[in-house]
């Protein structure tokens, strides 16, 4: 386990450096001049003299690699740069926007795990029967809906028609329900399928037959089968959690949720390159770190994964 962690951490260093370089260069590929965009956003006329002055103030007249290494040094110290549009520190804006996004992603993940676990267990217990077919048909049909369309339908039904839930903002605890449900619809079907498949595969194991021969109740056997079926779910979580954080921008804009996705969309419309670059970098780091955590969790749950890693190292 320790050797696996050391090897993965050693690979992270060049990978993260490569990500910082790619993220910074993506900003350089932008066809628009950040200085001119900054001037126009602040309702000024972009004369050649003013553009030159703004480029100097933003540091855009310095060599590319000089700016990259200065930006990288700031990133290593927790400074993601300064917004070209607002003049605010990007790190401060991200720290304000991250808690709402994490709250939304956490609520979505809770809905996905509870619904996916219960429905997956029911489908596995009644595999091939009407309950199994009905649950999977409903969930897979719902998961095929685009989340923005589902969000509008939910808003129309529960907010405009019934008046039960708020339509925008983060004003009350109930505000998270509609955006979280809208986000969860795309993931529930996947986890139902994963849990159902793993439980059916586990049901054919020798230890299940031995447990039934010992007279254990079906409830206890199902519980152990569920625990032994978590390997595929843990691997999926390693990708689903960063996808939830990175994929909230559409829902955040529909429900006016003050999160990092809405901040990024605003930066895209304003061509605010420091914010866009920081968003790409932070999301890439999220994907890498959660992938690492899922591998470690899988190794902790399944000793065969640790032995496999040791064998590869040998």
Image: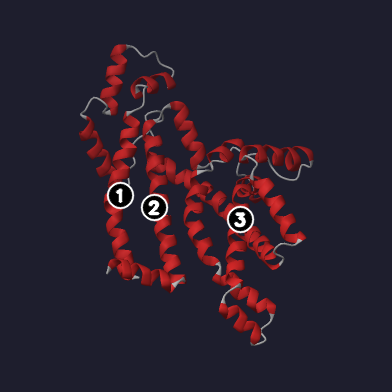
Q: Is there any visible trace of residue 77 in the rendered image? A: no
Instruction: Classify residue 126 by image quadrant.
Output: bottom right
Marks 1 and 3, how far apart at CA: 31 Å
Q: Which residue is mark 3?
A: 112
C-beta proximity under 8 Å, tags 2 and 1: yes
- Give coordinates of residue 101: x percent, y percent: 52, 47
Q: Position of residue 153 (x, y in %)?
A: 71, 39
| Label 2 sits on residue | 288
**Sooner in the amino-acid sequence: mark 3 or mark 2:** 3
In what element is the residue under mark 1? helix
Residue 38, image quadrant: top left
Lower sequence index among marks 2 and 1: 1
Task: First in sequence, mark 1 or 3: give its number.
Answer: 1
Instruction: Return the mark for residue 49.
Output: none
The colouring scheme, among rainbow, by chain, secondary structure or one colour, is secondary structure
Mark 2 and mark 1: Cα distance apart in space: 9 Å
Where does the image place residue 309, in percent across and percent down from the top left? 35, 67
Quadrant location of the C terminus in the rendered image: bottom left
Label 3 crowd (10 A; few <14 / some 14-19 / many >=20):
many
Find out whether the residues at labels 1 and 3 contact each other: C-beta distance under 8 Å.
Answer: no
Query: Camera-side residue: 100 or 232?
Result: 232
The residue labelled by disc 1 is: 15
Q: Is residue 3 left or right of residue 200?
A: left
Q: Which residue is located at x 26 percent, y 28 percent?
A: 59
């Amino acid at each position: 386990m320790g050797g696996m962690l050391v090897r993965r951490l050693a690979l992270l260093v060049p990978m993260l450096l490569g990500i910082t370089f790619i993220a910074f260069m993506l900003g350089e590929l932008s066809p628009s001049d950040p200085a001119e965009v900054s001037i126009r956003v602040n309702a000024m006329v972009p004369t050649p003299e003013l553009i030159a002055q703004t480029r100097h103030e933003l540091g855009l007249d310095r060599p590319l690699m000089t700016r990259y290494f200065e930006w990288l040094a700031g990133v290593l110290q927790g400074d993601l740069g300064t917004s070209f549009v607002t003049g605010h520190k990007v790190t401060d804006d991200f720290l304000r926007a991250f808690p709402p996004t994490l709250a939304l992603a956490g609520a979505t993940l809770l809905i996905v795990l509870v619904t996916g676990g219960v429905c997956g267990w029911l489908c596995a217990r009644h595999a091939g029967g009407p309950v199994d077919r009905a649950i999977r048909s409903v969930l897979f049909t719902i998961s095929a809906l685009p989340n923005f369309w589902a969000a509008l339908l939910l808003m129309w039904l529960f907010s405009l028609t019934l008046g039960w839930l708020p339509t925008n903002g983060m004003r009350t605890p109930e505000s998270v329900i509609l955006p979280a449900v809208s986000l969860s619809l795309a993931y529930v079907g996947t986890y139902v399928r994963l849990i159902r498949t793993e439980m059916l595969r586990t049901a054919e194991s020798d230890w299940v037959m031995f447990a039934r021969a010992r007279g254990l109740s079906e409830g206890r056997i199902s519980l152990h089968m569920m625990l032994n079926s978590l390997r595929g779910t843990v691997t999926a979580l390693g990708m689903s959690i960063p996808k939830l954080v990175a994929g909230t921008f559409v829902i955040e804009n529909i429900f006016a949720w003050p999160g990092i996705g809405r901040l990024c969309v605003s930066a895209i419309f304003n061509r605010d390159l420091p914010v866009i670059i920081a968003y790409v970098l932070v999301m890439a780091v999220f994907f890498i770190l959660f992938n690492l955590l899922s591998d470690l969790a899988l190794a902790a749950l399944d000793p065969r994964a640790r032995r496999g890693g040791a064998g590869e190292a040998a």
